[in-house]
Amino acid sequence: MVAIAILAAGRGTRMKSSLPKVLHSLGGRSLLQRTLDSCQLVNPLLRLIIVGYQGDQVQKALENSPDLQFVEQKEQLGTGHAVMQLLPYLQDFTGDLLVLNGDVPLLRPETIENLLHIHKSNQNGATLLSAYLNDPTGYGRVFCNGNNLVTQIIEHRDCNTAQKQNHRINGGIYCFNWPKLAQVLPQLTPNNKQNEYYLTDVVTLLSPVMAVDVEDYSEISGINDRIQLASAHQILQTRVKEDWMKAGVTLINPESITIDDTVKLEPDVIIEPQTHLRGQTVIKSGCHIGPGSFIENSHLEADVTVRYSVVSDSHVLSGTNIGPYSHLRGQVQVGTNCRIGNFVELKKTTLGNKTNVAHLSYLGNATVGNQVNIGAGTITANYDGVSKHQSQIGDRTKTGANSVLVAPITLGNDVTVAAGSVATHDVPDGALVIARQRQRIIPDWIQS
Ligand code: UD1
Ligand code: CA
């Protein structure tokens, strides 16, 4: 039986932020959400989140995660004090308690699983994750006897010069035998430079306590300030990009590319420099994205190309070409083998197959058929200042350069719109619409 507790009550002073530290985002998910997600292989009886500083905001940020229990730590008197708040909640609990600092977002689920396994098979009083760091500044130092049995943890600021030479650090991830921990928690004292109750002090009161070194020390990087946030982002990016390259994705100049770990790619996708893939994006095989593109929460089917463009909350079918300088602003569906060209903006618009919007257009709230050619500079005037209106454009219709379609409007199939027209009324199938002034010529305008 396991319960999970995540420590998320601290303000995170070193972030110098009005946002609680654990809510800062790392690649699209908060530090806290990531910490929570790293426990996905554990099947706990309870998941307890200890909140304090702006607790309401923290609670709200997790409202979509089911089955969480929030425990308030009114005053933030240290990590030991935070865990003391659990005593009334776990009175009859006799299992193990997994405790995670809410600011350690790069843990792999397998690492947590392994920690639990080692804890249980050795019947330890406590087991914790540790690592040797080249630069251990700021971390608590783990002192062990020869068998990885922990004798003491001393915080960086409380270490003397000799103790600082120990580079084995405490990751802030622990598994405790709860009944044993519950017994010793009340014995903690705030006898240190910060006058805080340190959770780490319980290791001298419990036995055996075992340190487990993680293979990849980047996993236990804690985030205390924005420099550490940035380096965690880099670690995460390296991990995500290497995984995709191993899975058959080509990244050209990967240092200039960012990919959220929620994005899904298929083999033989090519990503060019300065491209950023965010959120729930899915990109299928044969797509060629970038350079210079931003794709967010969008699905691109096979063989789509996107250059120097922004695509948000949209779905693009196979073989379509987008860019340069296109903006699919949301709720856009583009059919197969279309061409969305230079300086084209689409919003809440559906295009059929083999339809081109190649130059300088805005289409909003429009439904466009197959094999349509939207001429250069065609605009849907979809907003009357109060509400948005729909435009319907039938199959094989062609709009001339610089035409304005004043919505609501329906153009039938095979319609031709003359260049420079301002069309305000529906046009039947097969018709030509010309809605502009006839050209007048006034000769000899300049007197010589
Ligand atoms: C802590 C450990 C240190 C370890 C490091 C790993 C202690 C005393 N020290 O130090 O040994 O190397 O993590 O990253 O535990 N929190 C509360 N309530 C509080 C104080 C903190 O909930 O009263 C939460 C914070 O929100 C944070 C976590 O506990 O998520 C860790 O607190 P932090 O102040 O960052 O501890 P460190 O100084 O990093
Ligand atoms: Ca920390």
Image (tube, helix red, strand yellow):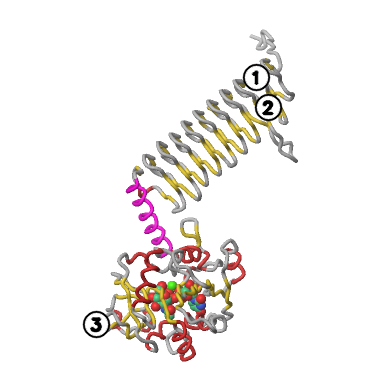
Q: Amino acid at mark 2?
A: Leu
271 left or right of 358 in image: left
Tell me residue 164's x, y (percent): 30, 80
Whether pointer 3 and pointer 1 mark residues with C-beta atoms closer than 8 Å, the reply is no
Label 3: element kind: loop
Viewer-proximal residue among 231 and 271? 271
Vertical relation: 23 (above or below) 93: above
Using residue 268 as the reference point, say whether residue 145 is left or right of it: left
Crowding at label 3, few (<14), some or many (≥20) Cα neighbours within 10 Å? few
* Label placed on residue 55: none
Upstream in sequence: badge 1 or badge 2: 2
| Quadrant of the rendering where the C terminus is positioned | top right
Q: Which residues are magenta?
A: 227-247
The residue wearing badge 3 is: 146
Q: Nearer the viewer, residue 14 or 396?
A: 396
Reading the image, the residue beneath label 1 is 417
User: Residue under circle 2?
Assistant: 405
Q: CA distance from mark 1 to mark 2?
A: 9 Å
